[in-house]
Image: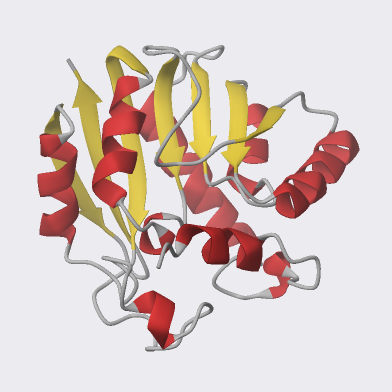
Amino acid sequence: MEVKPQIREWWDAAEHDYDSVAAHGVHSEEERELWRELITRFLGTEHKLKVLDMGTGTGFLALLLAELGYDVTGADWAKNKLEKAKEKMKLSGTPIKFVVEDAENLSFESEQFDAVVSRHLIWTLSNPTAAFKEWARVTKPGGRVMADVPAKHSHPGNHHFGEEIGRKLPFYNGADPEEVVSMFEAAGLVNVSVRRFKEMMLVEGEKI
């Protein structure tokens, strides 16, 4: 049975207060500063770079990117979460384009973005290999792709969607970073590296 419609329905449910969950929202200035530092180091200080925030949810990373001066598109397939992201955008006064997209099958033309970033997404994907190929496809030559990686066995067996759906998701119970590195390389990215932090790992690669 195709699990993607079920996953999409779960994320699009209005009753889910995504930002209130500790692992989802950002609840400290320390974490916010960490992401500012990571973004600046990853993208450099040249503003107006076109950046796709894939799996933007309620927009934390997209808003932070826009505050730093980048030209941001926030994409997610949950319309309810995007509506909350748009509300945040209006309050912040930072322009962001929010669009409905499937991470594994993007509608963008090739080589549209200087970078693709993703936070808290890959464990929800039914086909991460397809997603990484799509992210590489829409990245310009010389551009970069970055995704955070949940540690192996970091999620319980019934996390969010339930065990039946979870068994069909490659990274439902977390991932070994080496697996993600191999998929990045198979997608055509080079100079792939892993950076480890206290509570997360980041995998980064470049488009040639």
Residue sitting nearer the eye, 63 or 10: 10
Residue sitting nearer the eye, 70 or 171: 171
At horizontal 60% and vertical 27% (from top left) the residue drawn is: 73
Where residue 126 appears, as percent x and y from the top left, is: 35, 58
Does 97 sit left or right of 178 as displayed? right
At horizontal 85% and vertical 29% (from top left) the residue drawn is: 93
Would residue 131 be seen by someone viewing this image from the given angle? Answer: yes
Where residue 58 appears, as percent x and y from the top left, is: 70, 51
Q: How many marks?
A: 0
Where residue 195 appears, as percent x and y from the top left, is: 23, 52
Question: Quick check: 73 above or below 125?
Answer: above
Question: Quick check: 121 above or below 138?
Answer: below
Quarter where residue 168 is shown: bottom left
Quadrant location of the N terminus in the rendered image? bottom left
At horizontal 49% and vertical 48% (from top left) the residue drawn is: 35
Quarter where residue 28 is shown: bottom right
Question: Quick check: 180 above or below 68?
Answer: below
**Farthest residue, direction front:** 1
Residue sitting nearer the eye, 36 or 134: 134
Where residue 27 appears, as percent x and y from the top left, is: 66, 67
Question: Quick check: 123 above or below 107?
Answer: below
Quarter where residue 68 is shown: top right
Does 71 sit left or right of 131 as displayed? right
